[in-house]
Image (tube, rainbow, N blue to C red):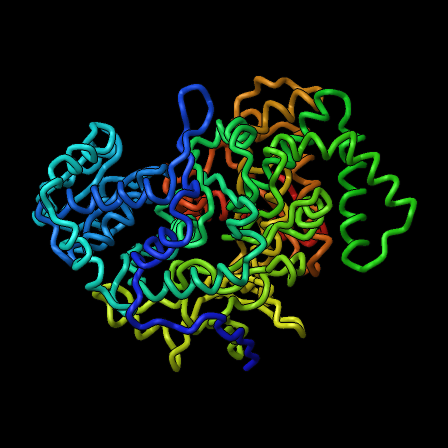
Amino acid sequence: MIEFSTPALVAADPTANTTDLLVDRLKATPDSVLFSLPTADGGWSPVTTREFYDQVIALAKGLVAAGIEPGDKIGLMCKTRYEWTLIDFATWFAGAVLVPVYETSSPAQVRWNLADSGAIAAILETADHFARFDEVHPDLPLIRNTWQIDLGDLDKLVAGGVDVPDEEIERRRNLADADDIATLIYTSGSTGKPKGCVLTHSNFVELARNSQIALDEVVADVDGASTLLFITTAHVFARYISVLCVSGGVRVGHQADTKFLLPSMASFKPTFLLAVPRVFEKVYNVSEQKAEAGGKGKIFRKAADTAVEYSQALESGHVPLGLKLKFRLFDALVFKKLREAMGGKVKYAVSGSAPLGTRLGHFYHALGIAILEGYGLTETTAPATVNLPKKSKIGTVGPALPGVSIRLAEDGEIQVKGIDVFKEYWKNPEATAAAFEDGWFKTGDLGSFDEDGFLTITGRKKEIIVTAGGKNVAPAALEDPIRANPLVGQVVVVGDKKPFISALVTLDTEMLPVWLNNNGEDAGLALEEAAKHPAVLAEVQRAIDAANEHVSRAESIRKFTILPLELTEASGHLTPKLSIKRNVILEDFSSHIEEMYSGAPATEGHSIVH
């Protein structure tokens, strides 16, 4: 087995828990701004470390007065906002355990998370969240307290806790040791029923303390580091970053509505971002289509090609003078505007959940934004590997984080051991036993190392397609480049036990009218009509042909079908982090898949469109 380890930079503390991260931050910089809250006029109002700490203690007292005992589970259904992290830390200071519920969850999912965890209280954000909870409340006899944030219930909790002494909060916050449960996060359920991952205080504390040093240039408070969080805090990725920012003294703002993301970035001016690749693809695609609409599409594409070439030259260590001058011109004409649209200060972006693609990695790198791709799962408290500012290779997900070891099994499966690995699946010893081998967590993902220990993700073990001819195909290698096309919403490669590879494609409804207009077609075309339109079919064909160029003939997509609908989280086809639920899609669209294989076998080297 190939194995790479990175030694921990901080000695583990068996007595530390997550509350220590805030207490230590308070001692270090009590008056620094830790959060910025959006104001009605589009500005931002500061919250210092001292103010945040005081609010955490006040809310913790309210939870205690309401009858919350150490070890109790509290469900939280709330979009990304300041109160999320406030509740998170208050729960820890009260000695309790938070169980996040995605704000998009159905009543059945709410019931499962709260019933399986044994939650005795629930905090909901909106009337809509409360309605979904209320539908299944009769099936949750353990829930004895419910609070609704939008009704001002947090303030009521605080008012009810004024008589709880400081000593009681201090006693409770010190009850948990490193090995005790800090939170119970349920997996997204992309491969079956969600399992509760027991993440310990040690997972958060050791990972935050080590990452703070490893990612010093990104999260150093001395340089005024700041980030605008917009991905859901219920997901381990944003949750871990929230904890890391408290630990590192990074100023954090929140904007859950992506429609307001660009104006918020312009006013907040973050120095780093946290996003999934789809966000970076969108920024690029919107910019390209905007340029196209203004008659400057050719200039934009030439600028993008120059940026990629420039970044590759930088990586090789030599940039020819002609390329330098050409890049400088496009930087003034095109790239400066893009940087300003993101607030003008973004130096880094941490990307996860799917591969970004080397072209986009180089494009943003040339703009002066290093996209640090990383890899991890709920079971690894988010990151197991990440590219670092001074140790980075575009196209990889980086080396193992300090305190983490990565190895590849004989079949290429990635296995992880170290400070980030979860303790167990909640009340599920069989699943826990099946997830480990000799103390190593089996991720189910496939990867490869280069000679320096940089990991590249090559696919998901359970998703490997084996064609009738015995060819093993990793869908992600085809799906990711096709999805980068502005017209494509989602793509699902199929072909298990079939004579050739095919694909189900959906269109990006946001980009569709823009693309149609830019290409001289009717921008008002309905999705059903667009899915059959010759120009649309030809553009999807181009995206598929480009992806096919990078695989063998046996792995190439020969047929595709455009579905006249969207795959969404609400439809049950995407997880909250927008990954496809492959098994659900294969089942729901089985007739469309069979139709692609019902005609004569495709022996041509290109797709045949139905």
**Residue sitting nearer the eye, 409 or 571:** 409
User: Relative to 340, is 529 on the left or the right?
Assistant: left
User: Relative to 398, is 317 on the left or the right?
Assistant: right
User: Relative to 359, is 172 on the left or the right?
Assistant: left
**Residue sitting nearer the eye, 515 or 369:** 369
**Residue sitting nearer the eye, 418 or 447:** 418
- Does residue 152 lie above or below 368 as drawn? above
Q: Which x, y percent locates residue 472?
A: 58, 66
Q: Residue shown at 17%/53% (left/top)?
A: 169
Q: Residue shown at 25%/68% (left/top)?
A: 177
The answer to which image quadrant residue 156 occupies is: top left
Q: Residue shown at 57%/62% (left/top)?
A: 457
**Residue sitting nearer the eye, 573 or 374:** 374
The answer to which image quadrant residue 437 occupies is: bottom left
Observer able to see residue 581: no
The C terminus lies in quadrant: top right
